[in-house]
Image (cartoon, grey):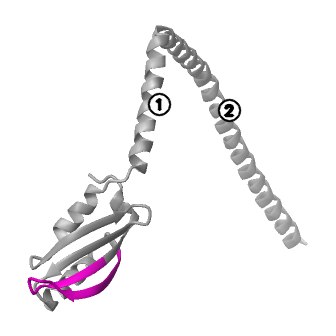
Amino acid sequence: MADLFVKKEASLAALGQGRSLLFYGSLLVFFLALASYGGLALLNPNLQNTKERLIEETKLKQESLRPELLSEIFLLDERLTNTRTLLSKHTFASNVFKLIESDTHPLVRFTNFNLTTDSRKLELSGEAADYAALSRQIGILERDPQVEKVEFGGLSFTVANLLGFKLTIILKPGLLQLRP
């Protein structure tokens, strides 16, 4: 029976110790919450004062702006937007000339040039010194990243004993847009 009494007292002591830990933990949480609330209560008036001061500064700056200046700013913004739209939809054929200039083989010359911007189709007639030069020219155009497709045909010999040909090049859409 004495063992039972000792066990009962030990379990009561452990229970009391557990309650004590729970009490101190709860007390700690309570004080942390109280300190947070106090910090916020002290901080809130300072934030309110800052907010009111910024609102006043904004009102003063708005009053200092002249209405005619604002209308000029909005007019300028509208004009810039219209110009940007115009440039983005404008066709820049000069980029095609740069492409032809950079991609023409030294033994090839083009004699006819027809650009259709709606279909991005460039039709060329030309003369090459021989079949190898013409083959290299077609390869150069096919490897260009701005060229979508190259169609070849119309082989003939010219009066000057050169190889005449016709090319149709389908250009990628980005080539006909403004590029720096």
Q: How many marks are shown on the rendered structure?
A: 2
Mark 1 lies on residue: 78
| Residue at x 70% of width, y 45% of height | 24
Residue 104 showing in the rendered view = no
Residue 70, horizontal then vertical, whole percent: 47, 17
Q: Can you say whether 33 is above or below 5 in the image?
A: above
The residue carrying pointer 1 sits among few (fewer than 14), some (14 to 19) or many (20 or more) residues within 10 Å by Cα, namely: few
Marks 2, 1: nearer the viewer: 1
Q: Is residue 61 magenta?
A: no
Task: Work out whether residue 117 or residue 71 is closer to the camera in this orientation and state it.
Answer: 117
Alpha carbon separation for disc pair 2 and 1: 55 Å
Corner quadrant of residue 152: bottom left
| Residue at x 14% of width, y 85% of height | 133
Q: Is residue 89 left or right of residue 126?
A: right
Mark 2 lies on residue: 34
Of the residues shown, which amino acid type is indicated by label 1?
Glu
Q: Main secondary structure of the magenta part?
A: strand
| Residue at x 63% of width, y 34% of height | 36
SS of the residue under disc 2: helix
